[in-house]
């Protein structure tokens, strides 16, 4: 019997590993990105766009751009992030335009600042579109190998070592490990190590990272069981179609890119469902203390919901199609880690799912994250130079949050390689700035998700003006290509031209006539007005105004028209927010030296000294947002700042 | 180191009791490591928080005084540092010697408010409380002192927090509709929103009124006596001041004519300025005086136009009335009631309140005091009044106008939400506390969110 017949895959790996260890490596990259999810993809693309020789390492090329949770992109706060990624040349919005099977604008009847785009995406199409982009991007290579270790020289990262011992050298490394770091999947009281259902976890890397001086914690997230659509009775459910006309995600996108569109469906749990769940709680890993990681309050499991809101008789479930070529549906709203038999019963107790066939059980997953307070606002770790973290590893949840961080980390890794200054968006510039600032100053106590209420300058940070806020910055950084830049400049000029025209064009009661004034303005005109003043009125839309005698013709580009209208209507508020920003700018942007010895600053409480020494805020604004730092502490720091912190440096 | 840039960790000392003679006088010392300091001064380190009888010794070992020493080691002290309180016999000489001795032991004289500042910096009190202490020290009258006391005990802060709490609830309802439109949550109707807003606005008005009164108690009001020469302004001032035992100060004014006197009007410190008579004059010195009278009127809270009741209201009086700044409250006083043997002339169409009196006999003076109090906005009730600073009033008024604006923006919910946010931030700026954004927490605890 040939001994090779029984050689395991593991043994082959070991042999290869021994052989590779002797090899002196080979390739030197500018930037290595570990992980091929939403953070990793944007990071690799961004670094490559800036002209860096980039390597993307993934444990599986097949799952590049995988949507491992619900099959949708965007939503309130999240859509804002996607538009920002797009404005900076990122891929997520464009990929969604190619893979989206339902598009909606949420809050469409509310104001523009809280309006947000959301799309259901076909998982297969999404993966394919993302992979195509990655594989065809100049400067970017892909290699399939899990990473086991980082190569460090002092406190500088210089490369990575893969599972089989291949060493890649790099000047900067972006780690986007998602839920794979020491991941553990729970179904009922059973649990096993995994990166997500069906994928291996990254144990060795997790172990190595735990040895570094980075604060580590555990978080938890979960998914619902998936259902075979052929076993669902949609006729008793409420249909939720997409919007008409179908929205587009990317500033450069078009409806023609969209595949066939599908509806979602709405049904509800009932008291019977709740009884079944309650009866199974004694076997729930959440309620028996098996799961220690903290889950998100805004995305609770169904067992959480019926326990915390016991008076609710029913909870809403959205059935979201997973794609055009598969039968699976994602029942959004019943995420659970209850044992399979309870999942089976609870699904079948729901209206329209009496005969449902579960294709995959729901599960909860616990994973390592690193305390984001150990990051600089560039997403580089404070502990190790050249090492950047992005995505769920930083305690966030969501594809969009991951993509936004990935883009930023990729950009800043590339900028560092090119010895250029890092780009750190501020809270008043982008949701990306709010996201990073929240993470690095406050840390997380649950998986962090974006909401518009987190942004104090919400009225200025809209989806519609993401390009006006960021594309020029992206161009300067080198992240925006010629095609996007040309389209942006054309749009910006058209907006300015139309605004000038509306300011210069006056209409008077005589030329308009009483009937027309009543129709468009809802009242008679008592005197002459420039068009821009009429557009400022809350009830006058741009399109309607253009039908007023003497006002048209307006612009045909809907993005331009929308921008002209929103800017006119919100001018007062935007100006006020700008004043607020300007007022706080001096304190917000006051730089705190990184060699500050807080123990030498008298007048600070011990607690404040310890917190500041640990977190090393970069600015006074960041310091003020650290929990437990009082205005008194900030006053003291300001006093010392006025004296230039002479005598409070570590070297002093 | 420049003298003004005091290190916050050096030792400070000050006489803590009021200047002048008293039964007991207190010198207070605050700094780090005062045990050695106490040893040098008292011959021993007093047991913490126990009144200890000892001799306070001079530089040469001689006895300054015998008294009680109280030692509060950090952090359990007023300032959060080591604090030493030396209670000696009252009287300026003894206390000055005691203070001088502290200085030779290494302390420096504390700047005004520095003890409170250290307490604030060491997290012993929030900003509103620290300001309350400063107000207590400054309190010109007893009622003001009582109100300052309320602020120290955080009642003002509590009232703000209670208001902020309700605002957070309303904001949570509003934000939930914006951030979670797809959830089936009972976020209440627009009417519910408006009802909550109305409650908050009413409470804010009440708080603002109480704070306004507190501001009046602390800062008092500036009242200018104006009128033609010989209308009886000076005698009226003398009468007002003379009625009152508690004349606080008498400060010569900025001109040779203007006299400023502080009187206690039902507990409110009212600063009355007697001015040069207003008339056309060729005398350059008098003209300067008249110009300054008009300056004083510009800055005042109330103008009292004193009219000679015997002559009645003249064209000149009406000219003065017409020249008063728009919006400045005015009180018309018809003097010399004792000389007028007929009902006094009350020509003119001014709607200003009028008082008839005799500065000479004192007849009608009580009516004047009541009219004055009313005209400066004092509602005669110190209970429930907060000692608010101008900063607090600004913030409260800012919050009030933001909430009024919110009322007009209920159709545009994101603008409604923005007004609420601004109002909330204004409230939070008073207590000086950085509150974590607890809106989301509020939303998640109230509503079952989780698509």
Image: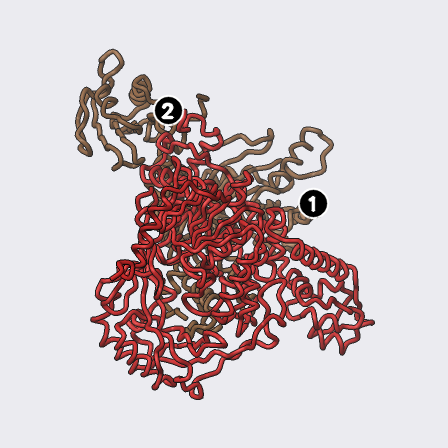
Chain colours: A red, B brown
Judge left or right: residue A486 versus residue A626: right
Chain at tag 2: B
Percent x, y of residue A400: 48, 60
Cβ atoms at labels 2 and 1 below 8 Å apart: no
Chain at tag 1: B
Percent x, y of residue B72: 24, 33
Q: Report the residue that reaches farthest toward the bottom.
A: A235
Q: Report the residue that reaches farthest toward the top.
A: B60
Which mark identifies residue A638? Answer: none
Residue occupied by mark 2:
B109
Q: Residues within 10 Å of mark 2 (few under 14, many from 20)?
A: some
Q: Residues within 10 Å of mark 1 (few under 14, many from 20)?
A: some
Who is closer to the viewer here, A107 or A13? A13
Judge left or right: residue A472 versus residue A135: right
How much space separates mark 2 and mark 1, taking CA atoms?
55 Å
* Disc 2 element: strand
Who is closer to the viewer here, A600 or A506? A600
Return the disc, 2 or 1, that comes first in the chain's sequence.
2
The reply to whether residue A622 is visible in this rendering is no
Residue occupied by mark 1:
B316
Q: Looking at the image, is mark 2 or mark 1 nearer the viewer?
A: 2
At horizontal 57% and vertical 74% (from top left) the residue drawn is A259
């Amino acid at each position: 019997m040939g001994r090779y017949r029984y050689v395991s895959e593991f043994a082959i790996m070991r042999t290869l590993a021994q052989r590779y260890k002797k090899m002196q490596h080979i390739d030197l990259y500018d930037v290595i990105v570990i992980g091929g999810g939403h953070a990793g993809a944007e990071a690799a693309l961004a670094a490559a766009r800036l002209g860096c020789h980039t390597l993307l390492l993934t444990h599986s090329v097949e799952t590049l751009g995988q949507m491992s949770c619900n099959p949708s992109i965007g939503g309130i706060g999240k859509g804002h992030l996607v538009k920002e990624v797009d404005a900076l040349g990122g891929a997520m919005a464009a990929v969604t335009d190619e893979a989206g099977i339902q598009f909606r604008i949420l809050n469409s009847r509310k104001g523009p600042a809280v309006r947000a785009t959301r799309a259901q995406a076909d998982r297969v199409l999404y993966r394919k579109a993302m992979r195509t982009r990655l594989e065809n991007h100049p400067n970017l290579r892909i290699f399939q190998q899990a990473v086991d270790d980082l190569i460090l020289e002092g406190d500088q990262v210089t490369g990575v070592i893969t599972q089989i011992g291949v060493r890649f050298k790099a000047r900067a490394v972006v780690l986007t490990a998602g839920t794979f770091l020491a991941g553990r999947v729970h179904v009922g009281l059973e649990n096993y190590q995994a990166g997500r259902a069906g994928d291996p976890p990254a144990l060795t890397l997790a172990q190595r990272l735990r040895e570094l001086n980075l604060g580590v914690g555990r978080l938890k997230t979960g998914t619902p069981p998936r259902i075979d659509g052929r076993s669902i009775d949609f006729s008793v459910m409420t249909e939720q179609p997409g919007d008409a006309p179908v929205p587009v995600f990317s500033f450069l996108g078009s409806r023609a890119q969209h595949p066939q569109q599908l509806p979602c469906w709405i049904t509800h749990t009932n008291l019977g469902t709740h009884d079944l769940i309650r009866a199974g709680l004694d076997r729930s890993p959440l309620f028996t203390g098996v799961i220690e990681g903290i889950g998100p309050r805004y995305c609770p499991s169904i067992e959480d919901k019926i326990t915390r809101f016991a008076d609710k008789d029913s909870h809403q479930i959205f059935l979201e199609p997973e794609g055009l070529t598969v039968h699976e549906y994602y029942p959004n709203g019943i995420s659970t880690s209850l044992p399979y038999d309870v999942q089976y019963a609870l699904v079948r107790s729901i209206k329209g799912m009496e005969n449902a066939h579960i294709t995959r059980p729901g599960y909860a997953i616990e994973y390592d994250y690193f305390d984001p307070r150990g990051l600089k606002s560039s997403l580089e770790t404070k502990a190790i130079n050249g090492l950047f973290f992005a995505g769920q590893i930083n305690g966030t949840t969501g594809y969009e949050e991951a993509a936004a961080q990935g883009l930023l980390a990729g950009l800043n890794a590339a900028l560092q390689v090119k010895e250029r200054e890092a780009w750190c968006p501020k809270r008043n510039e982008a949701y990306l700035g709010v996201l990073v600032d929240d993470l690095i100053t406050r840390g997380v106590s649950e998986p962090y998700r974006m909401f518009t209420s987190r942004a104090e300058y919400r009225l200025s940070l809209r989806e519609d003006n993401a390009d006006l806020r960021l594309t020029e910055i992206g161009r300067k950084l080198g992240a925006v290509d010629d095609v996007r830049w040309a389209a942006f400049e054309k749009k910006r000029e058209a907006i300015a031209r139309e605004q000038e025209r509306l300011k210069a064009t006056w209409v008077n009661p005589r030329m308009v006539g009483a009937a027309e004034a009543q129709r468009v303005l809802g009242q008679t005109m008592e005197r002459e007005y420039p068009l821009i003043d009429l557009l400022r009125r809350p009830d006058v839309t741009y399109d309607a105004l253009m039908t007023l005698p003497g006002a048209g013709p307006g612009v045909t580009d809907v993005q331009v028209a929308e921008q002209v209208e929103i800017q006119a209507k919100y001018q007062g508020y935007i100006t006020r927010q700008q004043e607020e920003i300007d007022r706080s700018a001096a304190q917000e942007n006051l730089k705190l030296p990184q060699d500050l010895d807080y123990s030498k600053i008298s007048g600070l409480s011990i607690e404040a000294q310890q917190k500041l020494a640990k977190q090393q805020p970069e600015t006074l604004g960041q310091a003020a947002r650290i929990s437990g730092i009082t205005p008194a502490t900030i006053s003291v720091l300001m006093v010392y700042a006025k004296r230039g912190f002479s005598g409070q440096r570590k070297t002093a | 180191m420049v003298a003004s840039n005091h290190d916050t960790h050096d030792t400070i000392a000050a006489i803590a009791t009021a200047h002048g003679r008293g039964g007991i006088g207190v010198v207070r010392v605050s700094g780090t490591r005062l045990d050695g300091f106490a040893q040098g001064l008292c011959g021993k380190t007093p047991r913490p928080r126990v009144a200890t009888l000892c001799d306070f010794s001079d530089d040469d070992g001689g006895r300054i005084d015998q008294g009680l020493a109280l030692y509060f080691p950090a952090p359990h002290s007023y300032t959060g540092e080591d604090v030493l309180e030396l209670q000696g016999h009252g009287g300026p000489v003894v206390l000055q010697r005691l203070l001088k001795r502290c200085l030779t032991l290494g302390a420096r004289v504390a700047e005004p408010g520095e003890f409170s500042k250290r307490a604030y910096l060491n997290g012993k009190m929030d900003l509103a409380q620290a300001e309350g202490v400063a107000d207590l020290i400054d309190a010109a009258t007893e009622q003001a002192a009582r109100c300052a006391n309320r602020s120290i005990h955080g009642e003002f802060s509590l009232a703000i927090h209670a208001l902020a709490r309700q605002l957070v609830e309303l904001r949570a309802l509003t934000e939930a509709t914006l951030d979670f439109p797809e959830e089936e949550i009972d976020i209440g109707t627009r009417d519910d929103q408006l009802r909550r807003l109305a409650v908050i606005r009413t409470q804010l008005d009440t708080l603002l009124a109480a704070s306004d009164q507190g501001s009046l108690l602390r800062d008092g009001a500036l009242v200018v006596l104006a009128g033609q020469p010989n209308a009886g302004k000076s005698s009226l001032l003398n009468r007002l001041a003379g009625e009152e035992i508690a004349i606080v100060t008498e400060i010569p004014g900025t001109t040779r004519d203007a006299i400023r006197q502080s009187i206690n009007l039902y507990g409110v410190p009212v600063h009355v300025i007697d001015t040069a008579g207003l008339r056309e004059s060729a005398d350059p010195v008098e003209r300067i005086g008249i110009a300054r009278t008009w300056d004083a009127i510009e800055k005042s809270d109330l103008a009292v136009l004193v009219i000679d009741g015997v002559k009645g209201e003249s064209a000149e009086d009406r000219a003065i009335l017409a020249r008063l700044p728009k919006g400045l409250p005015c009180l018309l006083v018809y003097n010399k009631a004792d000389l007028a043997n007929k009902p006094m002339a009350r020509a003119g169409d001014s709607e200003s309140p009028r008082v008839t009196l005799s500065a000479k006999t004192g007849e009608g003076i009580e009516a004047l005091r009541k009219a004055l109090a009313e005209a400066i906005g004092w509602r005669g009730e110190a209970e429930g009044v907060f000692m608010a600073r101008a900063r607090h009033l600004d913030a409260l008024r800012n919050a009030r106008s933001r909430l009024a604006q919110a009322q007009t923006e209920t159709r545009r919910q994101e603008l409604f939400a923005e007004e609420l946010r601004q109002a909330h931030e204004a409230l939070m700026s008073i207590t000086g506390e950085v509150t974590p954004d607890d809106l989301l927490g509020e939303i998640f605890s109230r509503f079952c969110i989780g698509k």
